Amino acid sequence: QVHMAESGGGSVQAGGSLRLSCAASGLTFSRNAMGWFRQAPGKEREFVAGIMWTTYYADSVKGRFTISKDNAKNTVYLQMNSLKPGDTAVYYCAAREGSSIYTDAARYDYWGQGAQVTVSS
């Protein structure tokens, strides 16, 4: 059984930083592509970043966010710097049965419960 849990959300002023963590169990981390998505109120869930053998980022976060993972700890991270009010959303980690990174949320099989990130101006 797969279980994923995010931590590290919170409130920060514009220009600040936060680091999200996602601990996963029941997955073979070295074989599962991982991703971070976010969903703001009234908007669709959108891709933020993905990682497997390489990393891939949405244009809106490129240069500000960094995704990484620790296979030994079965944990994926999202370091978020230079945060903007537009980054305010619930952030979800996701995993898929496969090694390709996709930006389509429907391609992911497992999801965490979400972590709120609020950026004030």
Image (cartoon, helix red, strand yellow):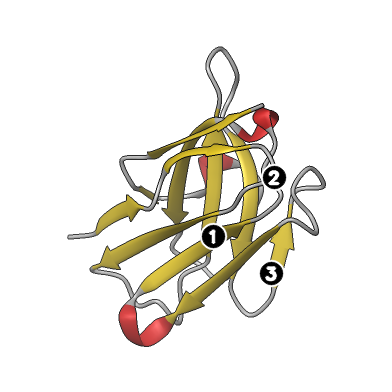
Task: Say what amino acid the circle numbered 1 marks.
Answer: Leu
Residue at image location 48% in from the left, 41% down from the top? 91
Percent position of residue 53, x then y: 63, 80
Q: How many marks?
A: 3
Q: Earlier in the sequence, mark 3 or mark 1?
A: 3
Rounded to the nearest angstrom, the CA distance separating label 2 from label 1 is 16 Å
Residue 39 higher or lower than 3, as above or below: above
User: How many other residues sit within 10 Å of disc 2, few (<14), some (14-19) or many (≥20)?
Assistant: some
- The crowd level at tag 1 (other Cα within 10 Å; few <14, some 14-19, many 20+) is many
- Tell me the quadrant of the picture where the C terminus can be found: top right
**Mark before the other along the chain sequence, 2 or 1:** 2
Front: mark 3 or 1:
1
Q: Which residue is mark 2?
A: 15
Image position of 12 with respect to 25: above or below: above
Badge 1 element: strand
**Lower position in the chain sequence, tag 2 or tag 3:** 2
Say which residue appears at 31% left-offset and 70% top-offset: 27
Q: Residue at the spot x=54%, y=60% of the render?
A: 78
Residue furthest left in the image: 1
- Residue with the mark numbered 1: 78
For mark 3, give the secondary structure.
strand
Circle 3 residue: 55
When the figure is inspected, residue 105 is found, relative to residue 43, above or below; the finding is below
